[in-house]
Image (cartoon, rainbow, N blue to C red):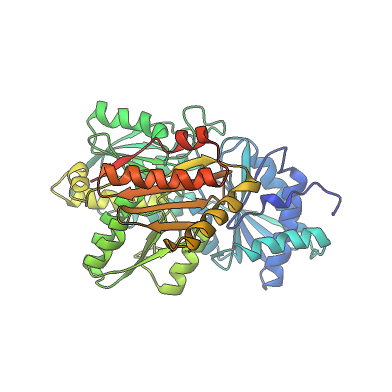
Amino acid sequence: MAKQKFDPGILREYDIRGIVGKTLHLDTAHALGQAFGTLVRRNGGRSVALCRDGRLSSPQISRAFSKGLRQAGMDVQAVGLGPTPMLYFAERHLQADAGAMITGSHNPPDYNGFKLTIGGKTIYGDEIQKLGAIIRDGNFSSGAGKVLRRSVAGGYAMRILQDADLARPLSVAWDPGNGAACPIVERLTRRLPGRHVVLNGEVDGTFPNHHPDPTLPETLEQLRRAVLSEKLDLGIAFDGDGDRLGVIDNKGRVLWGDQLMMLWSEEILRRQPGATIIADVKTSQTLFDAVERLGGKPIMWRTGHSLIKAKMRETGAQLAGEMSGHIFFADRYFGFDDALYAAIRLLNIVARSPRSLADLRDRLPETVNTPELRIECSEEDKFPIVASVKSRLQAAGAAVNDIDGVRVQTADGWWLLRASNTQNVLVARCEANDQAGLARLKNALGEQLSASGVEADVISSALGEERTAA
């Protein structure tokens, strides 16, 4: 096994991700399946729920991974094509000991990877690295597991609809982006009241209409046009595996993850005073302030779906969210990131309000900030760059929160720099009370990037966007 192609660089902090044919091969998938099956078996498990997204490479990778699982003695409960939250649902519904999702998530079509759970908990960090060690040592369990074909899509869709409580019919545009959420969106829109316009509703692993990442404004442009031209109440988009969402209000404006979190937080804290709510380090300070003002307990935490879910279990949080659109409801739900379920909870809020979504947005606190800024950076350089920035700032006595990268507080507001765990980029954000303050924050960020060797044209290209949160 040690002679097989295996690039340990695909073992990320909270999932496994590589480029098909370059860093991720069928041999890799087979070895990972056998290693994961070994890990599950050592934890006393015997069955694994297996799901895949709609990428062109996913069927072959799924078969290779399944073969590895069975050779490790695992029974495989194969649920076929679906979004990542359907896999999490399937693990519980089928009472499987573990779960495996074959997905490249929001990455380009030539990427693919694995999201893995044991006992309902997503494995990350050292647990993922154990898989590499098992493969390196060839220390596999052996057995002869079987494949059981299971259908859970109907049950999953009905569980989501169980919490749909629309006080009035809405007109909604849905854009699953040719991704794995398409079949579930079809089931939901057939049963929800109101008018529903579905864009890009056929699964196509080449993503022919736009990149499968709803945090990028350009990927929401088609949805924005549909909302405005059809005079709809709102639009909802999903990423390639259906665990992240983007939202357009009735005026054609993007609602970012932290703005949406304020709406959900208000709803939950009205019913559960004092509830704990978690958001990642990229989130606006206005959210943490709002949760505290509403009587809740806000917690700032590290970015990453695995890390957020672990913190939710530790704290008993009822809601958590990331700027990237991962939203986690423990209130009335399972606590995993499910963009389709989050969409239903948003529709409930809009349908109960006498105001439009745009009006609800306009009631939120005003700041001037950037969206997520992505700065191209090699895999080898991104962590050292953040470390060098942190070292300089701490030596200068700056107010630095280093829970995940560096979040720097100044008189103008704050700025953040962290290394992405899923892409070859640095992620940055800045937030201030006015345009002049934002300009100073962006300048400070740019100076730190320059001092760490990032080229001037890369910096200027990345720092050119800003938004007003209102």
- Pick whichever, 289 or 342, lies toward us: 289
Left or right relative to 403: residue 159 = left
Instruction: Determine whether 142 is above or below 284 in the image.
Output: below
Taking the spot 66% from the left edge, 54% from the top edge, the residue there is: 11
Q: Position of residue 28 (x, y in %)?
A: 74, 48
Left or right relative to 213: residue 287 = left
Taking the spot 71% from the left edge, 64% from the top edge, the residue there is: 130
Instruction: Inspect this view and state whether residue 84 appears.
Output: yes
- Pick whichever, 461 or 216, lies toward us: 461
Instruction: Determine whether 200 is above or below 190 in the image.
Output: above
Instruction: Determine whether 257 is above or below 140 in the image.
Output: above
Residue situated furthest left in the rendering: 354
Residue situated furthest front in the rendering: 396
- Pick whichever, 157 or 15, lies toward us: 15
Q: Position of residue 256 (x, y in %)?
A: 34, 46
Left or right relative to 25: residue 164 = left
Rendering quarter of residue 356:
top left
